Image (cartoon, rainbow, N blue to C red):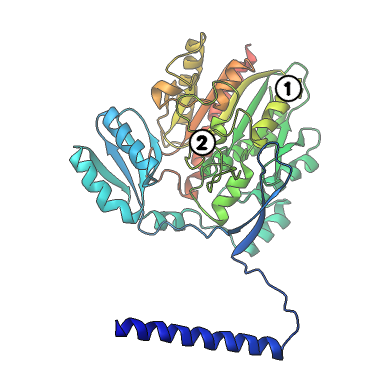
Amino acid sequence: MERTGRSHNARFVAFSFLFVVAVAGAVIDRQKREFVIPDWIEIVDEPAPENSKTIQRAVRVRDAKVTYDGAQVWRVEGHKDIVSNVTMDFQEAGLLSLWAGNDTAVDVMVRSEEISRLSRYLKQKDLSYQVVIEDLQKAIDEENPSLSEQEMEELQGRKGHRMEWTSYHRLEDIHGYLDYLAETFPDVCSVVTIGHSVEGRPLKVIRISNGKSNSPALWIDGGIHAREWISPASVTYVINHLVENSEALEADYYILPVVNPDGYEYTFTKDRLWRKNRKRSVGSLCTGVDLNRNFGYRWGGLGTSKDPCREIYAGSGPFSEPETNAIRYFFEASSANFKAYLTFHSYGQYILYPWGYDKRVPPDYADLDAVGKQMSTAMKKADGARSAYTVGNSATTLYAASGGSDDWAKAILKMKYTYTVELRDTGKYGFVLPSRYIVPTAKEALAAVMVVTEACKSL
């Protein structure tokens, strides 16, 4: 008791001393001091609920850069129902992140503090696993040895833009490249901003055409999931090839290299493995909507979540996001003769056709399967690496995912050839594919585009 009393008295004396000092300081210096907000605090406008008459003001701590020190990527194998239940439980608890998977195996990212617990749990369930990436942060650090500022300036001075395919580029370089093409090759290229992202970044679509009437049109996009860097890199490579060989064009191409510009930039500045857009959800501390669950066909079904904290959160409703809405409005206004819709993702090396919302297929699935197999053959021959791409229905080959852009394009836009192409690799590097693989992977993407172009010519 005596010790407690002394402690209490000491605290009282200390508080009294600080109070006296503070009052004395205020008497000596009565000048009004300006309050400076620390750089780690951000004042933001939060979205107001519907029918609210006021705009909510909020203060939040700025996002710190996410690191993955000690994290690993595992491939878990076993009976599909057990694997599915285990990964679901741990995902719900925020203890792991699902990277990819099929009926027999899943790739999961495990943070360092959860490695022991998850290992014990898997053994209890008689599930085997292998470590695919032993040091995830090291893989991230080594993935993209970018060019120096001097090299970038030299590149721009020599070519008129900063784009090349030995490294992954920021959004500014990609958009600058599109603008350069439109200014340099106005007879072939034009660029239009079809909308803006949550944070106000432009959604730039380049049209590549030689102006022939009644040419079939193909839509190509990339970067709908922010962390899949190989997708925009491959799509810009395709753009480069089409422009350089424009005299041989037999179709019109409308290409959006980065569907999710906010998320894409966030992967460079804050969190390399961010997936969703950057929409702040009302009533939740979590951010982002999975744009490939937000399209208006079978929205909110299998393979989606209503929880804003989940990576497969489908949003508050179909087309709730400005990025997906911009694509919808573009097609509503376009008079182009669209025959194909190609969306590039990673990873796994798959060529997937609808439906994704359930294990069903469209009436013309045999045509989709046949052209998909032609794509696979061409991609295998593209670079000498003989990469094998599996062809099949989305939900059956991988997993059900409702509200995807491919299902919407097939069902609502009535596109004949609609594919989601999951580019390299099959799991050795996953989402952190080193930049030395950009060109070989992009050549495979280009081969797929050429096969679909040929198929569209006969429609």
Judge by depth and name the residue closer to the eye, 18 or 348. 18
Of callouts 1 and 2, the N-terminal one: 2
- The secondary element bearing badge 1 is classed as helix
Q: Position of residue 163 (x, y in %)?
A: 65, 49
Marks 1 and 2, how far apart at CA: 26 Å
- Residue named by callout 1: 332
Judged left or right of residue 383, residue 23 is right
Q: Is residue 163 left or right of residue 438?
A: right
Does residue 420 show up? yes
Q: Which residue is label 2 attached to? A: 313
Q: Note whether 454 is above or below 79 in the view shown.
A: above
Q: Position of residue 244 (x, y in %)?
A: 68, 37
Q: Bin the neighbour count of mark 1 within 10 Å (Cα to Cα): few under 14, some 14-19, many 20 and up.
A: few
| Residue 167 visible somewhere in the drawing | no
- Indicate the quadrant where residue 146 lies: bottom right
Within 10 angstroms of label 2, few (less than 14), some, or many (20 or more) residues? many
The quadrant in which the N terminus is found is: bottom left
Type of residue at label 2? Tyr
